[in-house]
């Protein structure tokens, strides 16, 4: 790609949370980008950069006509579609048809995320390692299926998008039946659902999750990073599933040998399979995987695919990318990333999510409460703050959502990175003791390092 400075380029980032915040930050580092528009954006997106960041909180990520109008009016050079429901709405297809350069998958390619039932059938066709599953078209079908299964642990999953909360664990068949009934609360997203066997080793050991990210132009792909998300709301993976309470990178469970297996048995097959299906995938493809012990060796399995950056995984992987994100986005949009030499800075990162007390349930008592210490937290060396559900009024910050902000620490090891993240988190508070965060992000790898098992 040319290194010649191009003045005046405007980039649109379609996202409103922490993932969008880190993308805004990374695009702002580019010498080619002068201004960023975030749709809908959030009030913390300006916190890390002096370049203009314009937000449109009144526009939904699925408002394809409004987004198209902004792109035309502002002569936008590149659009990064980072939100799952925007992919499902066909935003990439609409913008591309109008000649606007986009990084992100088409609606058909993105079905690998927004339709879990389709994704499992695709995985079966392509021979991807994945858990035993049953697709259910009704509550009655799910309950009948469970009656004929041995008592065991399950996951019950809404087939369509449910804001990251449509996966319910069950310890046995009785609890699974209750979870099947709970699919109704997800509305249309849960009308079709999956019953999946809980992955565990053949010795009964618990598997360990990881996330791996590739950039692909539909034919070529490059692995650009991995992380380990912490989805449960409380320490040591207890409580309800959330959109993610923090993560660490790189995950030490994902050895070089395992990563080669992930590439050969999953990622390569997925990219080629989508192409074969007539759904060439352009953009970031996220593999949510699990490492499971079989016959004394660890092997990777597919938990899910996402058709965009993860949140909060983006907050620890995107900053590690040395490449100019604008140049990368253009290469994806033009359909050829083969000439890009992807490089990362080799640092470890830990991100801790700050949430409203009560999240992911009722957190209404926290709405409107003032948040203190965000500006002080970002002054900690090796720390960045990314926003989500925060409103800024007259220079002060207030709670406006469930997941509020993300504190990212970086260092040579996960221990150092975590120490910085929690040092910064310690200066943040919310009126009425309404701040909740996990205190153990990265605990598995900290234990590995402590015991000398890595």
Image (cartoon, rainbow, N blue to C red):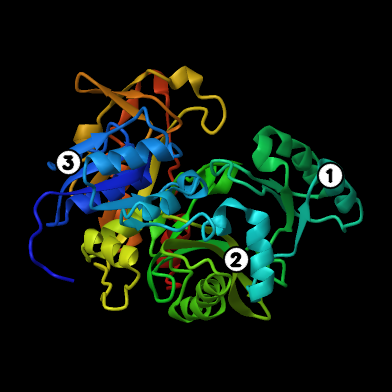
Q: Is residue 264 left or right of residue 431?
A: right
Residue 292 occupies quadrant? bottom right
Q: Residue at label 3? A: 379
First in sequence, mark 2 or 1: give its number.
1
Whether residue 350 appears in this view of the structure is no
Secondary structure of the residue carrying numbered label 2: strand
Q: Position of residue 99 (x, y in %)?
A: 32, 55
Q: In this rendered view, identify the residue nearer to me: 271 or 175.
A: 271
Q: Is residue 329 left or right of residue 285?
A: left
Farthest-out residue, front: 98
Q: Residue at x 22, y 65 (%)?
A: 322
Q: In this rendered view, identify the residue nearer to me: 263 or 13.
A: 13
Relative vertical location of residue 346 with respect to residue 71 in this rendering, above or below: below
Secondary structure of the residue carrying numbered label 3: loop
Q: Position of residue 226 (x, y in %)?
A: 41, 65
Crowdedness near tag 2: few (<14), some (14–19) or many (≥20) residues, C-alpha within 10 Å: many
Q: In this rendered view, identify the residue nearer to me: 6 or 19.
A: 6
Q: Residue at label 2? A: 302
First in sequence, mark 1 or 3: give its number.
1
Q: Which mark is residue 230?
A: none
Question: Mark 3 or 2, which is nearer the eye?
Answer: 2
Question: Mark 2 or 1, which is nearer the eye?
Answer: 2
Distance in Å between CA atoms under marks 3 and 2: 39 Å
Distance in Å between CA atoms under marks 1 and 3: 50 Å
Q: Position of residue 255 (x, y in %)?
A: 45, 76
Distance in Å between CA atoms under marks 2 and 1: 26 Å
Q: Residue at x 14, y 56 (%)?
A: 32
Quadrant (top left, top right, bottom left, bottom right) of the C terminus: bottom left
Q: Residue at label 1? A: 174
Q: Residue at x 67, y 38 (%)?
A: 188
């Amino acid at each position: 790609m040319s290194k010649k400075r191009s003045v005046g380029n405007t980039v649109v980032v379609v996202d409103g949370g922490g993932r969008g915040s880190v993308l805004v930050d990374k695009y702002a580092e580019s010498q080619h980008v002068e201004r960023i528009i975030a749709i809908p954006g959030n009030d913390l997106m300006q916190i890390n950069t002096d370049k203009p960041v314009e937000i449109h909180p009144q526009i939904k990520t699925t408002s394809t006509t409004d987004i198209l109008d902004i792109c035309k009016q502002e002569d936008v050079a590149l659009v990064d579609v980072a939100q799952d429901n925007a992919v499902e709405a066909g935003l990439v297809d609409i913008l591309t048809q109008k000649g606007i350069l986009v990084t992100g998958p088409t609606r058909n390619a993105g079905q690998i995320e927004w339709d879990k039932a389709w994704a499992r059938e695709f995985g079966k066709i392509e021979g991807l390692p994945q858990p035993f599953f049953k697709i259910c078209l009704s509550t009655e079908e799910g309950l009948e299926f469970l009656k004929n299964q041995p008592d065991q642990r399950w996951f019950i999953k809404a087939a369509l998008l449910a804001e990251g909360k449509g996966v319910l664990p069950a310890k046995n068949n009785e609890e699974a039946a209750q979870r099947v009934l709970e699919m109704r609360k997800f509305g249309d997203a849960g009308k079709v659902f999956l019953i999946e066997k809980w992955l565990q080793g053949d010795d009964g050991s618990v598997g360990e999750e990881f996330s791996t990210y590739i950039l692909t132009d539909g034919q070529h792909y490059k692995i650009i990073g991995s992380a380990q998300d912490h989805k449960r709301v409380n320490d040591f993976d207890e409580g309800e599933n959330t959109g993610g309470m923090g993560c660490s990178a790189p995950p030490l469970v994902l050895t070089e040998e395992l990563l080669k297996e992930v590439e050969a048995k999953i990622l390569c097959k997925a990219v080629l399979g989508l192409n074969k299906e007539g759904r060439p995938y352009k953009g970031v493809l996220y593999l949510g995987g699990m490492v499971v012990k079989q016959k004394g060796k660890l092997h990777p399995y597919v938990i899910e695919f996402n058709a965009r950056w993860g949140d909060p995984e983006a907050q620890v992987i995107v900053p590690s990318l040395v490449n100019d994100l604008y140049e990368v986005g253009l290469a994806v949009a033009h359909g050829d990333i083969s000439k890009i030499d992807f490089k990362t800075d080799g640092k470890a990162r830990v991100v801790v999510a700050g949430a409203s007390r009560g999240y992911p349930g009722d957190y209404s008592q926290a709405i409107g409460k003032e948040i203190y210490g965000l500006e002080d937290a970002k002054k900690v060396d090796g720390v960045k703050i990314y926003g989500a559900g925060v409103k800024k009024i007259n220079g002060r910050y207030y709670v406006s959502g469930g997941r509020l902000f993300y504190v990212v620490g970086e260092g040579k090891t996960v221990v150092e990175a975590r120490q910085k993240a929690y040092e910064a988190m310690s200066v943040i508070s919310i009126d009425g003791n309404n701040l909740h965060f996990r205190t153990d992000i990265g605990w598995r790898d900290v234990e590995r390092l402590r015991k000398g098992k890595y």
